[in-house]
Image (cartoon, rainbow, N blue to C red):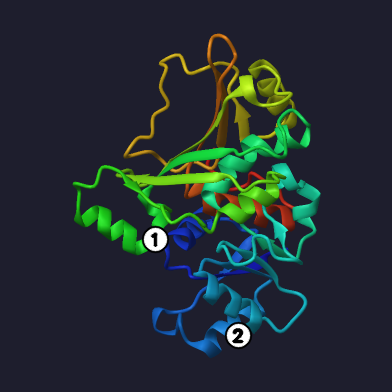
Amino acid sequence: MTASVFIDGAAGTTGLEIAARLAGRSEFALITLPDDRRKDAAARTEALNDADVVILCLPDDAAREAVGLIANDRTRVIDASTAFRVADGWTYGFPEVIGRDTVAQAKRISNPGCYPTGFIALLAPLVRAGLLPVAWPYSCHAVSGYSGGGKALIERFVRDPGIGWRGYGLAFGHKHVPEMQAYAHLAIAPLFAPAVVPAYRGMVVEVPLPLSIIPGAPDPAMLRAALTAFYDGSEVVSVAQSAPESGEILLREGAAAWDGLRLHVIASADGDQARLVAELDNLGKGASGAAVQSLNLISGLPETAGLIL
């Protein structure tokens, strides 16, 4: 049976990437609006209520408005904004961490943020297993391609090729922090330091661990083994079994789209320090790929169908 899907915000970066992953798939029929009706309230309301599944690729306030326009209990929603990520009644769309059955049965799914995807993937299994403490001041250093900032930031990087690094979130209180704390099961909000570089896509997220002073912390090999066991069988998430031979992790300017997630535990020779590192595509597992993965699950399809792996 073909399911109808309406991407509200289809002209944006995330919407375009979702549509590309659904192109040619007979399981879904896209409901589209002509350009002159994309912002027409009546047309949007009709599409929102006609669709079997709505994928929202909108700013937070517009996403809340769109959900309010759905007047039936049949339409399922996948929201790519920050609006509902820690809201009651919404399921966090990270099936590897939350549970595939939980996502498959959900009516309202909030797509994880790109940075939180890497952070939570690294920490949640280790904290949940008791290998790392709940009450510890974790920090997160992360760098992303500029496409995650939307049209305005994309235009800024294209217009000014001299930008080599853009650190932001300097006022603290970044909107990703609540979900990072909630789904990594932390008692203390992490210190989050995000940045953007002149690459269109790609992301590296790092959590440094001073293991020698973390109470009860195990050696790095145990951390790697725990992550490997947790993600065993996943076609999306992989765990590197050794440090990169080159001694480097690279984010390339012209990287291809990718919906996977690669995790590393890189340790000092004496095991006193470790760096938990996640590699992903901010537009893939960090946005559009994650939305399609959830769409597959709620549609009873293989979760990797249409993904770029």
SS at mark 2 in the image: helix
Q: What numbered label is drawn on residue 150?
A: 1
- Residue named by callout 2: 46
Residue 292 in view of the camera:
no
Answer above or below: position of 232 versus 242: below
Given residues 161 and 252, the one toward you in this image is 161
Answer above or below: position of 74 versus 205: below
Residue in the image at 72% along x and 51% along y: 301
Q: Amino acid at mark 2?
A: Glu
- What percent of the width, then of the height, locates residue 235? 65, 35
Residue 72 in view of the camera:
yes
Q: Is residue 298 left or right of residue 162?
A: right
Q: What numbered label is drawn on residue 16?
A: none
- What percent of the width, then of the height, locates residue 89? 76, 67
Going from N to C along the chain, the mark reached first, 1 or 2, is 2
Quadrant occupied by the C terminus: top right
Q: Dot 2: within a 10 Å radius of its alpha carbon, few (fewer than 14), some, or many (20 or more) residues?
A: few
Residue in the image at 69% along x and 44% along y: 186
Residue in the image at 33% along x and 43% along y: 199
Q: Amino acid at mark 1?
A: Gly
Select label 1 or label 2 by which is in front.
1
- What percent of the width, then of the height, locates residue 304? 64, 44
Quadrant occupied by the N terminus: bottom right
SS at mark 1 in the image: helix
The residues bearing labels 1 and 2 have C-alpha atoms spaced at a distance of 27 Å
Given residues 272 and 54, the one toward you in this image is 272
Please identify the residue farthest to the bottom as the structure is shown.
42
